[in-house]
Amino acid sequence: MINPFFKNHGPILLSKIISTLNLDIDKINKNQKVNDIKDLYTSEINDITFLHSKKYKDLAKNTKASFCITTNNLKNELSKNCTPLIVKNVLLSTSKITSIFYPQAIDDHFDDSCINIIDTKFNDNVKFGENVIIGDNVDIGINCKIGHNTIIEKNVSIGNECSIGSNTIIRNTIIKNNVKVLDNCIIGKHGFGFFPIKDNNIRYPHIGIVLIEDNCEIGCGATIDRGSMSNTVIGKNTYLDNQIHIAHNVKIGENTIIAGQVGIAGSTVIGKNVKIGGQAGISGHLNIGNNVEIAGGSGVIRDIPDNTKVMGYPAKNIREFLRDNK
Amino acid sequence: MINPFFKNHGPILLSKIISTLNLDIDKINKNQKVNDIKDLYTSEINDITFLHSKKYKDLAKNTKASFCITTNNLKNELSKNCTPLIVKNVLLSTSKITSIFYPQAIDDHFDDSCINIIDTKFNDNVKFGENVIIGDNVDIGINCKIGHNTIIEKNVSIGNECSIGSNTIIRNTIIKNNVKVLDNCIIGKHGFGFFPIKDNNIRYPHIGIVLIEDNCEIGCGATIDRGSMSNTVIGKNTYLDNQIHIAHNVKIGENTIIAGQVGIAGSTVIGKNVKIGGQAGISGHLNIGNNVEIAGGSGVIRDIPDNTKVMGYPAKNIREFLRDNK
Amino acid sequence: MINPFFKNHGPILLSKIISTLNLDIDKINKNQKVNDIKDLYTSEINDITFLHSKKYKDLAKNTKASFCITTNNLKNELSKNCTPLIVKNVLLSTSKITSIFYPQAIDDHFDDSCINIIDTKFNDNVKFGENVIIGDNVDIGINCKIGHNTIIEKNVSIGNECSIGSNTIIRNTIIKNNVKVLDNCIIGKHGFGFFPIKDNNIRYPHIGIVLIEDNCEIGCGATIDRGSMSNTVIGKNTYLDNQIHIAHNVKIGENTIIAGQVGIAGSTVIGKNVKIGGQAGISGHLNIGNNVEIAGGSGVIRDIPDNTKVMGYPAKNIREFLRDNK
């Protein structure tokens, strides 16, 4: 995961983690330092990770993490070098610990570090409209344009030859070269991820970013949320029409074309050369293959293999759908 | 109905009402004063109300209103203390009379009372971004944030600990405590309510407001319209994802979760602890019970009882839908 | 097609057209001047046109154009006065030649001709909010209002008695009298039209405009794209609710009512007195008749004759749909 933005406040003392989780553990050296929180696969020694489902038992067997937030039922799936920290609600506990390592990744209040672009180093080498403001830790390449009233909040890197429209808001995002982001977009805000708690939901941190590869076009009114534990990615030369919503952790391949008002729910992976018709909706955590065509208005609730054309709600083979719906 | 905002221009002379409706009535004292226009249930003595459907005959029998705009067919349903004013088109006539009592509630031109927040009393106790402007009759509690380019138009009350994003527009709205409204939202504008008239439709007044209870989160790009004769309400700790449209008079209960691009049509009532998946649409004037789950992409056209899971278009029991659509 | 905005850079020497298309033609006088590029029907003598499908063979037989971009298979369909220029990809070649005549119609970077309205002739006769900016070649009638942060980019004509909301962006658009455009709209940007080319799609020019007739209302958050080779038209007294997307070349008739979150794909023609329910989607290149009613949530993929009520996905006769979906 490319993420140059969220500062890791680790190492954190194990004692702080244990007290945060309200655990009663004796036979552990609580003065050990924990470097970072990562998923099972990318964790290194002295990191903490989490395991909340048997689905991940193969990764759990091989994790290099020294500690793992998990349940009593799952603790035996872990590598022998990994000490389980037993909790009732793995995701809620993981959220609490991630918040210690990355306290800035929970809320997305407006960025008060923004100042008028006229007072920044970009005054000379960016072409910009009225009332453009820029936050901390922003980088912009050569030959870029930024439209009126646009807000480039903190933690944004924009490559060369990019054109950003007007009334657009971007944060926690890497944009490569020759990308067009049209008007009224909101890119890089946290996703719709939280633990539903009666009377006062708890948000979990989103430490991922949005990554937009070369030659993409993002249509007017798009919302593209940054990832929670991984990144949201728009592949090279992928074009999005107006009013599209891309949720957190979604990955879209290269040369894909997505028509207006499409919505893609969290953590779904979409292949290359995919065509998605207007108003189609795709559920979360699905795999959509390469060269897939999804007809406008479809509701996709299952994985789709490569080279398949689908239509309908729930979406199925397009010939079958049209035969059944003459 | 909580509505501290729209000023009632009453009392109005009955003679003015009669002439506005082009009625030819003799046996009435036209110098009587009419205090206000309300629905059948909330009207008091010396108020005017309206009755346009037999559905409301029980309310009509018991109304305290002194006058009622209605049709010849319906006039006998009214309480004996209530004088019928017989018209051809009840709703159009009601609109005309409401416009006399509440002339400011018809059009939503931009609010020219707005000035830069720097020049208001909020300069000291609100944390705000660039180019924030504030209209007349605005109240903001402690520890609030308001993002860049946001417009708080007239008639807005914001509680404590609220975070309003950037590029957002709010008017005629009460926001309670600890509410987050993200970027690019438009809250409190009139609904899509008008009388279709060939070549020049006539808008009717929207004298309701939007009420957002404690601990809610409203996602980016939301449009939440204020009510026409009642309020639009978002219950406590209800979370809305991005690009959601909530029409006028909709009431949503507590602890409800609504995913991206959902649309809810006018006057529908949604219960507590409801979950609505992405892109679902709900028709107007429906009752959706408590603890209901509506799958993403569903089109709901009928009432849904408590504790039910539905899917499909038209939405039906989810097990039935999935069985029929393997 | 009414289009006072895009300047034709013609006449262009035929030699330049031939070299741009990489053609190897000898027996032609390459010093001839070509005036303009138009469709088969509207072309005049000394214009160039294009033919990419047998569907248009009747128009091709009668075109007055002197030159036509077409394929070897189609060349014999042309009028005898029309010289074929044989290419492999007609649309891509047409795009290249259109770009020579209309170089400003390809990209929609922010308009850097905009200045604060206070510094324009409109300071005195338009009522405007904070931070309103106006581009080149803008005309505004009497008694108009323009809300805060709104950007009227170049090439816009607004009639009398119009109310434009806040945070709205308009370019390449003619708005007639007594029109309301609410907040956060984006009107007149290019459509989602391009040739998909691996690794770097090529946009084609959009030389049409958006035309909004008298007494219309455009709801919050609308995106209405301008036409590519014809105009996008919203007919008189047509009302659009919030969050609607109208693609390029769409034509909507008079007195039509469209509810929230509807999407209409490119080049579809919609009649008069049509009612479209919320979240309905209409595919491109369709004909929807007069007095049609389309239920909310419907997905329309075929033409609909006059006076028909449809529902479903794909949309069919509403009685049939409700009978099949009790």
Image (cartoon, coloured by chain):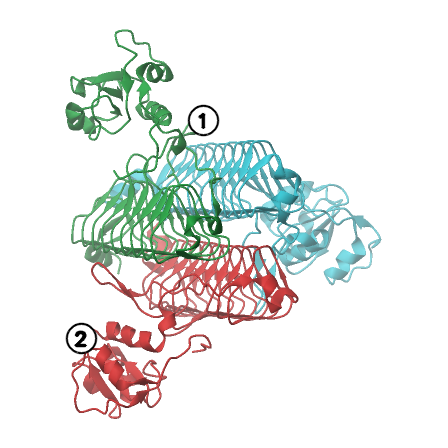
Chain colours: A cyan, B red, C green
> How many numbered dots are placed on residues in this image?
2
Q: Amino acid at mark 2?
A: Lys
- The reply to whether residue A71 is visible in this rendering is no
In the image shown, does B96 or B65 lie closer to the viewer? B96
* Residue B255 position in % (x across, y down): 52, 67
**Residue for badge 1:** C198
Q: Choose between A24 and B83: the one closer to the eye.
A: B83
Residue A252 left/right relative to A171: left
The quarter of the picture where the C terminus of chain A appears is top left
Instruction: Pinpoint residue A110: horizontal percent, then vertical percent.
Output: 60, 55
Looking at the picture, does residue B61 appear above or below residue C265? below
Height in image: A24 above or below C56?
A: below
Between marks 1 and 2 in the image, the one whose residue lies nearer the viewer = 2
Badge 2: chain ID: B
Percent from the top left, x then y, of residue B256?
Answer: 49, 65
Q: Residue at x 76, y 46 (%)?
A: A35
Q: Position of residue C227 (x, y in %)?
A: 32, 39
Q: Are marks 1 and 2 in contact (CB under 8 Å)?
A: no
Secondary structure beneath dot 2 equals: loop
Q: Which residue is mark 2?
A: B88
Residue situated furthest top in the rendering:
C26
